[in-house]
Image (cartoon, rainbow, N blue to C red):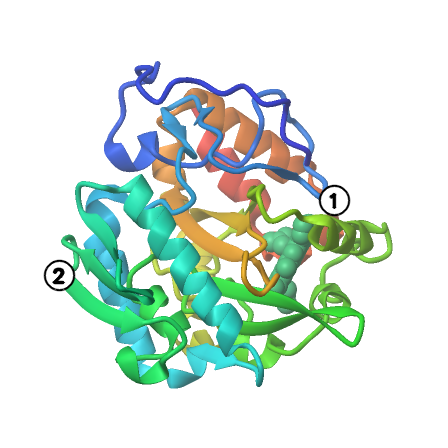
Amino acid sequence: MTLAPAAPTAATDAPAFPVRGHTARLPWPFPDDLDAFRYSVNVEPARLVRRTAAGEWGATIVDLGGEEYGAIMAERRRILDADPHRVRIMPGMLPACWDLLLYYLRDLAASYPAIMRLDEDPRDPDRFRWRNAALGTDQTFVLGDATSLPWDPMTFLGREVPDDLLLVKERDGELCFDAGLVTFAAAWSVSFDVGMTMAEIHNPVPRLTREGITSRAEQFLRRLPVDQVYRRVNWTLSASGSRLLDVSLEELPAWAGDIPALVAAEDWGRLQLRIEVEHFIRLPMTGAVTFNIRTHMTSLEEIRQVPAWRDQLARVVLELPEDLAAYKGFLDYREPAMAWLTRR
Ligand code: HEM
């Protein structure tokens, strides 16, 4: 899918459809005129505000999630405390993690000045004070000094933002996924994937490498300039019939029975569309590239209330070729689920 040409709108425009906050903020993954979805290098400039049938999204790199921010961060912190393997930093990647931390804290302070603040010490350019009133964080640190933070810099950032954090670095001529903090993976594992090349990671995805999309994605990442941020939207039907974000392979026993139970009960309204907004940033000090993933969920019950979304999702899901529907996990139940969605 390549998104339609940029159509920025003012963030103050009233949404056409009166709906609750969660739906109004949702990054609907399909352009208005899309009826058939195929994989592509579907990147577009970041911070572009997109109107949807229910509201708008996309003004900032980090979407804190409004009133859901506290609950998402509590879940993120619970997982990090319980499972240290969700953070994997390959040797030599700590400078890139500091680079990531400073870039994001500066961006957050600029995007959310009412609750977030980063002060630089005029006497010492490496000394900072970060305050996040929403989570009660007040931390002074020295850039590059591991002893000045309670966690490594990637973990410190991951406890402040809802995004999964992934860093790509060129190693031996290959683009490698060499550091990550991932608590909300869609049926993959950061421990398993970290250190892999782009080709190795994307091999399980049908068509991607064969159709040249993996190599075009690599070209895009290699050419990404420092001063331009891009994003991409990805989607699937979630492997859980709830808002559970952590459907990672680490937690497979906890969610593996969820969809079979939902299908047996024909409880289609609980099925979740899972939307991932991914940001690509070339970090200024180290040249590492981010692939940070912010995951959103919305149920078929909610989608049914927005007629344009209801009809478009059903068309796209039913039209998808079998190999893609199988990879996304809904080949076996897409027909009854979409019949429920569109039933009048
Ligand atoms: C423009 C760049 C990229 C494109 C176009 C792209 C494309 C894709 C697509 C189409 C999928 C299948 C997703 C689905 O159907 O739900 C996928 C999966 C995935 N991608 Fe990427 N990707 C890109 C960059 C990256 C990067 C930089 C990383 C890691 C740092 C990455 C990590 C993954 C992982 C872990 C999966 C799941 C694979 C699995 O099922 O085991 N991708 N990607």
Above or below residue 23? Residue 83 is below
User: Residue 123 or 98: which is nearer the viewer?
Assistant: 123
Identity, as a three-letter code, of the amino acid under mark 1: Pro
Residue 24 percent across, percent down from the top left: 32, 29
Crowd tier of the residue under label 1, counting other residues whose Cα lies within 10 Å: few below 14, some 14–19, many 20 or above: some
Examine the image and state in which quarter residue 321 appears.
top right
Q: In 3D space, how far apart are the residues under numbered discs 2 and 1 (Cα atoms)?
A: 48 Å
Mark 1 vs ligand 1: CB under 8 Å? no
Which quadrant contains ligand 1? bottom right
Q: Position of residue 128 (x, y in %)?
A: 27, 64
Please name the amino acid that badge 2 sits on.
Answer: Gly
Circle 1 sits on which residue? 321
Residue depicted at 37% across the width and 24% down the height: 54
Give above or below for 226 relative to 303: below
x, y (%) of residue 112?
26, 42
**Residue visible at 20% across and 68% down in the picture:** 139
Q: How crowded is mark 2: few (under 14 residues within 10 Å), some or many (20 or more)?
A: few
Give above or below for 224 relative to 35. below
Mark 1 secondary-structure assignment: loop
From the image, tell me which residue sits under label 2. 136
Q: Residue at x 40, y 63 (%)?
A: 101
Mark 2: is the Cβ under 8 angstroms from ligand 1?
A: no
Q: Can residue 143 be seen in this view?
A: yes
| The C terminus sits in image quarter | top left
Mark 2 or 1 closer to N-term? 2
Q: Viewed as shown, does residue 166 lie left or right of 66? A: right
